[in-house]
Image: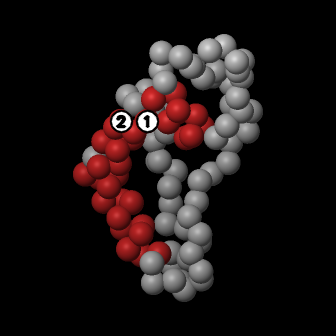
Amino acid sequence: TGDVCAVIMDDVAGQGYQGENAAQVSMIDEVLQADPLGFAFTEGSDLVAPFNAAIQSMKADGTLAALNAKYFGTAFTITYDDIGDGVYANN
């Protein structure tokens, strides 16, 4: 309807919104600030290892890419290559 000229939002949320509304919106290429994404667990949590294993499995078998394409569109550019095992992985 022409009511909004610009919005500042998280890259993942922005790409998701753009995927759903590609005919109406576009994203500029300039990143104003970038911060890593993380999930928080209490120190010593039994969930860390299975969570990390699930993420790695989803990356390896293409599930993560398929979900990205389904919900964010084919132009989704976040690769998750920088996802590590986190600070408690070796504890």
Other residues around mark 2 within 10 Å, as few (<14) / some (14–19) / many (≥20): some
Instruction: Name the residue tied to disc 2.
Output: 69
Amino acid of disc 2: Ala
* Pointer 1 with pointer 2, Cβ within 8 A: yes
Q: Residue shown at 38%/28% (left/top)? A: 74
Q: At numbered mark 1, what does the secondary structure look like: helix, strand or loop?
A: helix
Q: Horizontal and vertical percent for residue 72?
A: 43, 35
Q: CA distance from mark 1 to mark 2?
A: 5 Å
Q: Residue shown at 59%/53% (left/top)? A: 37
Quadrant holding the N terminus: top right
The label on residue 27 is: none
Q: In the depicted view, which residue is nearer to us: 28 or 34?
A: 28
Instruction: Name the residue tied to disc 1.
Output: 72
Q: In the depicted view, which residue is nearer to us: 2 or 51?
A: 2
Other residues around mark 1 within 10 Å, as few (<14) / some (14–19) / many (≥20): many
Q: Residue shown at 47%/75% (left/top)? A: 48
Is any atom of residue 7 visible in this view?
yes
As drawn, 27 above or below 62: above
Is any atom of residue 65 visible in this view?
no
As drawn, 76 above or below 87: above
Q: Residue shown at 73%/39% (left/top)? A: 33
